[in-house]
Image: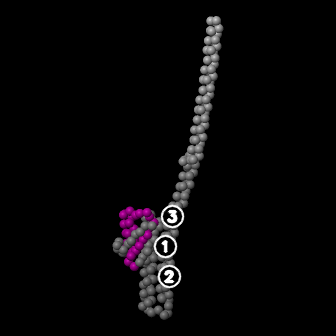
Amino acid sequence: MKLLKKNQVIIYVIVLMLMTAGYLNYTTNQQKQSIQTAIETETSDDTQLADIGDATLVSSQDTEEQNMTMEEETSVDTTNAIISNDDYFVKSKLERDTMYSQMLETYEKVLNSTNSLETQKQVATQEIQKINETKNSIMICENLIQIKGFENNVIFVNGDSINIIIRADELKQEEIAQIQNVISREFKTDIENIHIATK
């Protein structure tokens, strides 16, 4: 009887151990599945967040190419602005020289006309001389100012007033003084009559 009870106790213990082992095995598998499911869910969420794309990761090569493109566009814009300014100076000089040519042509017609009075011919001669002197002084001043580093400049003379436009962002005081001295000396005029502007 005692032996039977001992065997029953052993069987109960073995069954209990098997049940415990099975339970532990079952709960471990459940935890693994839960962890796996959680990982998959997080990965899926991360992918969705990545798809929303607050920021897009690019390689350094892509960034360099974009920077080069932006630099090229900026360079093109700057070049276009410079060309535009150059066109202004070329066009202004052409219009000014055309005006002087037309004035000279008018005075020469007076000189060559048989209907012109002597006084009219004298005035025409004086005006032709004045225009030629003005043109010559303008040419000398523009060339001297170019030598001083201002490649693009244009001078307009209107009576005693002399206006010069220079391509520059700004001029230092000593540069203004140099330009004024060149114009004052060549045109034999006072500094007060010289007006400098930048473009």
Earlier-in-chain disc, 1 versus 2: 1
Q: How far apart, in angstroms, are the residues tagged by discs 1 and 2?
A: 15 Å
Secondary structure at badge 3 equals helix
Q: Position of residue 64 (x, y in %)?
A: 55, 49
Closer to the camera in the image, 189 or 129: 189
Foreground label between 2 and 3: 3
In the image, residue 172 lies in the stretch drawn in magenta: yes
Closer to the camera in the image, 54 or 91: 54
Please give the residue where the numbered disc 1 appears in the rendered image.
92
Asked whether the beta carbons under mark 1 and mark 3 sit within 8 Å of each other, the answer is: no
Kindly tell me whether residue 182 is visible in this rendering: no
- Residue in the picture at 43% in, 77% down: 134
The amino acid type of the residue labelled 3 equals Ala
Q: Which mark is residue 102?
A: 2
Image height of 123 relative to 181, above or below: below
Closer to the camera in the image, 94 or 71: 71
Q: Quadrant of the C terminus?
A: bottom left
Q: How far apart, in angstroms, are the residues tagged by discs 2 and 3?
A: 31 Å
Image height of 45 relative to 79, above or below: above
Foreground label between 1 and 3: 3
Earlier-in-chain disc, 2 versus 3: 3
The amino acid type of the residue labelled 1 equals Ser
Please give the residue where the numbered disc 3 appears in the rendered image.
81
The answer to which quarter of the image holds residue 15 is top right
Closer to the camera in the image, 67 or 27: 27
Q: Position of residue 179 (x, y in %)?
A: 39, 68
Q: Position of residue 131 (x, y in %)?
A: 44, 80
